[in-house]
Amino acid sequence: MQSDTEKVTHSGPGTRFKPKLLPMDLAIKYGFLVLLLGLVIFFSLVAEGFAGPYSAVFIFQSVAITGILALGVTATLVVDGFDLSIGSVATTSLMLSSYVLVVWEMNAFVAVVACLAMGAIVGFINGLLIVKMRVPDLLATLGMMFLLIGLQRIPTQGRSIATGMILPDGRVTEGVFSKAFLALGRHRFDFFIENLIPVSVIVLLVIGFLVWGFMELTRHGRLMYAIGSNERAASLAGASVNKYKILAYMISGVLASVGGILLAARLGRGDIASGNNLLLDSVAAALIGFAVLGAAKPNAFGTIIGALFIGILLQGLTMMNAPYYTQDFVKGAVLVVALVFTFALSRRGGVH
Amino acid sequence: MTDTVVSLEYLGGKLVQNTAVKITDITKAFGANNVLSGINLELNSGQVTVLMGANGAGKSTLVKVLCGVHRANSGTIRLYGEAFSPTTPSEAIRAGVVTVHQSINDGVIPDLDIASNLMLDHLAKPGGGFFLNKRKNHAEARKVAAAMALDVDVTQLVSELGLADRQLVAIARAMAHKPKLLILDEPTSSLSAIEAKRLFELLDHLRKSGVAILYISHRMSDIRRIADRIVSMRDGKISGVFEDSPLDYESAVNAMLGYSMTDVDIAIPEAGEPVMQLNDISLRPESQPFSLDLHSNEVVAITGLVGSGKTELAAVLFGLSEPCSGQMKLLGKTYRPCSQRQAIEAGVFLCPKDRANNAVVQGFDITKNITLPFLKRHATFSFLNSRSEHATAQRTIPNLGIVCQSDTDDIGSLSGGNQQKVMIGRWLAEKSNFLLLDEPFQGVDIKARRDIGHKIRETAVGRATLVLVAEMDEALEIADRILVMFDHTVIGDHRNQDIDLKLVLAQVAGQQSEQTGSTEYAI
């Protein structure tokens, strides 16, 4: 992996002094995909068992939830906003679905609908805070993050939710995670090999496709990009800026709650300590996505590649027996390199 | 800073014109694109050199090389004999080359008070002491402001100032450096006539003290007032230097454009039915109400000083704000838009001023910038039809003479004039009942200005067109009818035929009586 990064960073300054910009453009456009490919080849050669369908599925599964949240972050980045509350929305959704199933003893459908509604409401409130109350986006969603982290602990006095736990009023819970709900996290579809593709991966692909289509193919997506680039111009061209901004935060909230549902279904309990890394990982994925194909803007395809990149890197390092505590460092380093790709290398020539 | 003072002192009281800046064979290319190809130019101390050039001629690039933003590919610059090749803007400033950029907010920090803005570069100077002496700072700032005849409270925040005052603060800040070469890039583009006059007085004063001044402008009135010498640029080369008095303005324009511009002849068409009717509108609670009919087929220009209420009128017409009193009628029906969307749906389009902030969407290509307001027209069930979008763009590009490689060029790769053409094309792409253009000629060269004006007049049939301009030349060039605004009301209405310019100018200056004689706002 080391050698690959060097190759790419060297090609940068080397080409800068030549009048021809072609190699530079290529590096910007395909650099990250080449890096990804190089990474896969490198791990396949070095780490035993990396190149196999089950390893691939494991990566996809670990990437799926991060990727879904990252798509939400992407939606807010498109309108030049930012959502710091996604991680806590996901964990709130995890706790809420567990509460509905285990304490209220309702079915999977109610649990899912309750979580999606919660995500939409949180996103709507975020949007209102930003658009109507004029709170800066980072601060509004930071406040919401703290609020939710606290809120999700109140009903259970800070304890995890599982069948048989004792509630604050002394009652013992009897509800269980229904089979249908657990299937969301644990069922695997056959794909050439039996039990290969997990549900979460399908959900990621479907949501990724929907977000991509919405942003790239519809006029709503176009207007959201316009708002992100020049809000005033978009407004003077007749776009309902406030509505689209609120919509972006609602998309973000709903997708984060989907991530939480999948996490709950995989864990099978309302684990209070899960999901700590979700915020940073998904933000990193969305920002790495800027660099993919030289887009230099938030985009759904890049976001998924970004999530995949982190997933492959971590899986490979784990299989090479790198200690767990080096993971955050590696993620940070990748993010910094990706940001350099986006901002330093693709911002040339714009000023004449 | 001290060596500046010395060099100026030994010039003594007399106006010795020695070479302050000598530019030799400067070239600069962006990629394969040669922007400057061998510039040779001398700038003398105590002289205002006006640099003219169409958009894309390389003026801004030359300025950016001088002020340390870009590095030249080859060639040398000498500043009073010493080699000068700044790598950063602050290096250029320390060497005595100070620039006031066109975009005002580059020159000031809105959240600080005026005093801090004026003294900012002293505060940023290395070794300036750790603690801030507020009283001394204010006193120094007051001195700088007084020298500029800038009558402001230095403790006021810059964000509370109007555009024009901000510009003057930016210039005052540049002056605090005691520059050897002062570069002004379109400094009057947002100043009113009175403020511009103050600026020119200041430049006269600086000229006497031996500063070399490079002044970039499109405004003929500024150039006539201030130029000692005109340098014309075209296609990255110096195409003419004019320094014999009286200056030959026509040849200078000629050298810049490569051919001469004829005066525009306005053929006033038959006005149709009234499209937009304003009845006893008052823009401010205390302002005089006025009534106005704008007819189909006719192009009306409203002129007036900065702050005369033109922008407020545009806001009312486009649904950005409500009038204090009065009614509006569009095609005979009551018109009261609550949002931009409603105005656009009623066929009332606004092409706003200050394209960088209000119109251009950076990161979008030409096509996306053109189709932005009418995406519904290019979409089925919200899904965009890119073929229909490109068809519109490919119609617009030759129509307005936009110079580009293709309709997928990034908007940022176009020159200012071409960007403005794209913005005009955006609103000409659909049929409107009433088209409102606020300063459509802002920061564009004379050729682009004629192109745009011609296109607006050519398409005017079937709609009412209202153009808001500060410059009289522009109004005379485009309008069938010229209205004058002063103090938030309309005080003059002239048919653009054998027009009494003296009267119009007197009205612009707010003098209602006709016997005021000559006015200081002469064009």
Image: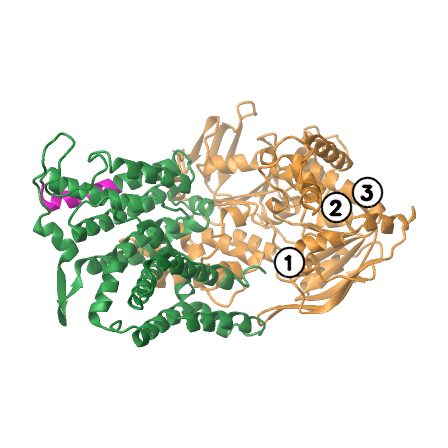
Chain colours: A green, B orange
Determine which residue is flagged by label 2: B177
- The one of B143 and B343 positioned closer to us in this rendering: B143
State which tag comes first along the sequence, 1 or 3. Answer: 1
Neighbour class for label 1 at 10 Å: few (<14), some, many (≥20)?
A: some
Residue A168 placement: quadrant: top left
Q: Residue at x 24, y 42 (%)?
A: A92
Measured as percent of width and height from the top left, residue B468 is found at: 57, 42
In the rendering, at what x and y percent does residue B151 appear? 71, 31
Q: Is residue A350 above or below residue B488?
A: below
Q: Secondary structure at mark 3?
A: helix
Give the foreground label among 3 and 2.
Answer: 2
Quarter of the image holding residue B491? top right
Q: Between residue B259 and residue A273, name the one nearer to us.
A: A273
User: For the residues tagged 3 and 2, is the chain the same?
Assistant: yes
Judging from the image, mark 3 belongs to the subunit labelled B
Residue B69: image tag: 1
Q: Chain of mark 2?
A: B
- Count residues near mark 2 (Cα–Cα under 10 Å), then give few for <14, some for 14-19, many for 20+: many
Q: CA distance from mark 1 to mark 3?
A: 28 Å
| Residue B39 in view in this figure | no
Q: Position of residue A225 (x, y in %)?
A: 39, 52
Q: How far apart are the alpha carbons under marks 1 and 2?
A: 18 Å
- The chain under label 1 reads B
Q: Nearer the viewer, mark 1 or mark 3?
A: 1
Q: Is residue A107 within the magenta segment?
A: yes
| Distance from the alpha carbon under mark 3 to that under mark 2 | 16 Å
